Amino acid sequence: MAKLTEIGWEEFERLPLEAKKPYLENGEIPDTPFHTLFAQQFDRELLERLARLANRIRFMAKSKEGAMYLKSLLCHKRAMLYFSQPSSRTFLSHLAACQILGLTTGSVRDTAISSEFKGESKEDSIRTFSSYFDLIIMRTPEKGLAEKMAWELSNSSRPIPILNAGSGKDQHPTQALLDIYTLLRSFENKGGLRNRTVTFCGDLMRGRTVRSLSYLLTNFENIRQVFVAPPQLQVPEDVTAILAAKGVEFTKSDNLREAVTLSDAVYMTRIQDEWDESKGESAKIDTSRFKFGAEELKLLPAEGIIMHPLPRRDEIATCCDHDPRAMYWRQMRNGMWIRSALIAMTFGFEKQIMCFGA
Ligand code: NCD
């Protein structure tokens, strides 16, 4: 069993992501993550286990008896939501997931009113939270900070799990979990998540949800990936290198309409202009052909679905919202269930929940 206490930070940092996976597992519960930092920690079996657990929690939460049982599970634990980057749904979704399981929560959202303003390092701030809490859910603009904190905390006298709720332009593992959960549910009675074409469209260069989901999809049989974007915002090399190494079929395109006709799922994303290096850089790019509207809706196969991590701007026209193939609102709610499943699993309650009422 690999342990973060047995490897130095520099050595750990240099490992390829898949090699880091065993270090992030829960030593006491087999095949279960302790820290959740990136998509490479999840294989198909774990994804399906999480989806089953989320379905179970979803069902239990419908009755008062089930909801009260769930609430009793982690009422002795506290979670800290440290979000130093803008967020509404990811913050609320994690908050709701904690509430479902009875965790009490605290939050820091504005570092200008925390001790970081007095010059405290992020590392020291997060270490401080670990004195009062049992789980840290964090979103930061810095790539790698969640990973560094996971290593630091595992090497401290109070090792508590870190859950990455979005790290820079890099990864957003829990978003990818909810995306996979949505895909699994959408195709459940239609032949499953295999032999499908998933099209990503928008800012694929800077969208962290795309990197995490593209990887998770490689766990499923014969999923072709199509990347539709203006050349300046096309998917980065590190994402396609993984696909190439795994023998996954993928294409890059600038023709959304053509891709839509062949897609089982179209995953739209917004232009991430907060990452512009010079002011107004993204506004100069012609993105007019990378929007999903009434015409694209006509071209989408009858069983195809439209997804979006949200928030959206104008990349999906509101006229699509009431089409049964528009999955983005359900996708968002799925996030609350899959995050509850992940937190419950992290704390070792998977079996108990699955056996409830049996
Ligand atoms: C995404 C994010 O923060 O990366 N949003 C989310 O978590 N639902 C996508 C985005 O901001 O465009």
Image (tube, helix red, strand yellow):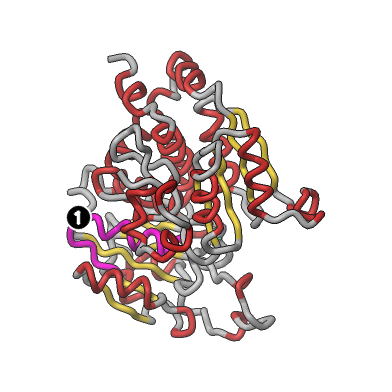
Q: Nearer the viewer, residue 58 or 29?
A: 29
At a point 42% along the width and 38% down the height, the residue shown is 342
How would you rate the neighbour count of disc 1 (Cα within 10 Å): few for under 14, some for 14-19, many for 20 or more? some
At a point 42% along the width and 70% down the height, the residue shown is 201
Above-or-below relation of 16 to 53: below
Reading the image, the residue beneath label 1 is 194
Q: Quadrant of the C terminus?
A: top left
Q: Nearer the viewer, residue 30 or 247?
A: 30
Count numbered badges in the picture: 1
Q: Amino acid at mark 1?
A: Arg
Above-or-below relation of 245 to 90: below
Any atom of ligand 1 within 8 Å of the CB at mark 1? Answer: no
At a point 54% along the width and 33% down the height, the residue shown is 98
Observer able to see residue 322: no
At a point 54% along the width and 49% down the height, the residue shown is 152
Assign a secondary structure to mark 1: loop
User: x, y (%) of residue 101?
Assistant: 50, 27
User: x, y (%) of residue 223?
Assistant: 23, 62
Magenta region includes residue 351 = no
Q: Quadrant of the N terminus?
A: top left
Q: Give left or right: position of 332 versus 141.
A: left
User: x, y (%) of residue 149?
Assistant: 55, 51
Magenta region includes residue 217 = yes
Above-or-below relation of 199 to 330: below
Which segment is the magenta one? 209-225
User: x, y (%) of residue 137?
Assistant: 56, 44
Observer able to see residue 122: yes
